[in-house]
Amino acid sequence: MDDKIQKFKQLVNESYNIVFFGGAGVSTESGIPDFRSKDGLYNQKYDYPPEEILSHTFFISNTEEFYKFYKDKMNALEYEPNITHIKLAELENKGKLKAVVTQNIDGLHQKAGSKTVYELHGSILRNYCMECNKFYNAEFIFNCSGVPKCDCGGIIKPDVVLYQEGLNDETIRNSVNAIANADLLIVAGTSLTVQPASSLIHYFRGKNLVLINRDSTPYDNIANLVINDSLGKVFKEL
């Protein structure tokens, strides 16, 4: 494994247009639970399946129950960036990392100092009134009681992509452009099974693809380097 980490360090040192594509495994080392592991949200018991609660239909038809779950399980405000977030921000500051493409909604990349972050599934940090589109921060949402309401009386919706909703077109375009122009694509903390996000890997035309994940992925066979280990262990060596 040490040889693989040394190879990873070499690839980072030799690359000047790096893009990082990350999933839930990037944030689990900050203490944020993922969805699909044995202890993830999808394997916990609620009155409704989490997949149903986090759907557009459920949000519209059962908004109060949605917010009970959302406030209980999606609040990431007290979590801090881990070594992976921090090292990525350092690489961007040095001009080597051009973009972070993330499936996470916790805002920890920005909290660590990353500037160019494309959030495929939105962010808990942005919330908008469904009537007048007024912006509300996450503190307002998580600290209010019941269903968050705007000054105009409209219901406030988190700017996160729920099931049955499409991804933001501009975010997709920016992500595709960044990945297509990268010389090194680092894919980490994701099983690469969630569509359409995982399909973005097909746009990579660069020299080196590195996959870092505890478990194998469907794309291991096309990668130049596969590291099945903790992201923290790998990134602390950079």
Image (cartoon, rainbow, N blue to C red):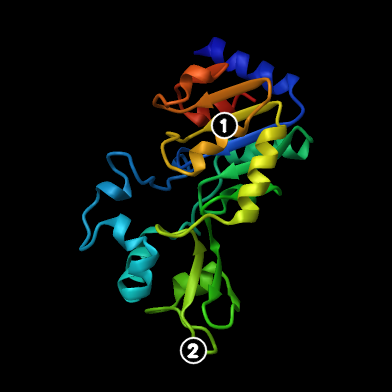
Could you tell me residue 182's position as x and y percent? 70, 31
Residues 16 and 141: in front is: 16
Relative to 76, does residue 230 appear above or below in the rendering? above
Residue at the disc numbered 2: 153
Q: Secondary structure at mark 2?
A: loop
Cβ atoms at labels 1 and 2 below 8 Å apart: no
- First in sequence: mark 1 vs mark 2: 2
Could you tell me residue 161's position as x and y percent? 48, 58
Q: Residue furthest top?
A: 3
Q: Residue furthest bottom?
A: 152
Relative to 158, does residue 210 appear above or below in the rendering? above
Q: Residue 202 has which mark?
A: 1
Q: Is residue 26 visible?
A: no
At 55% from the left and 17% from the top, the residue drawn is 225
- Comparing marks 1 and 2, which lies closer to the viewer? 1
At 32% from the left and 45% from the top, the residue drawn is 40
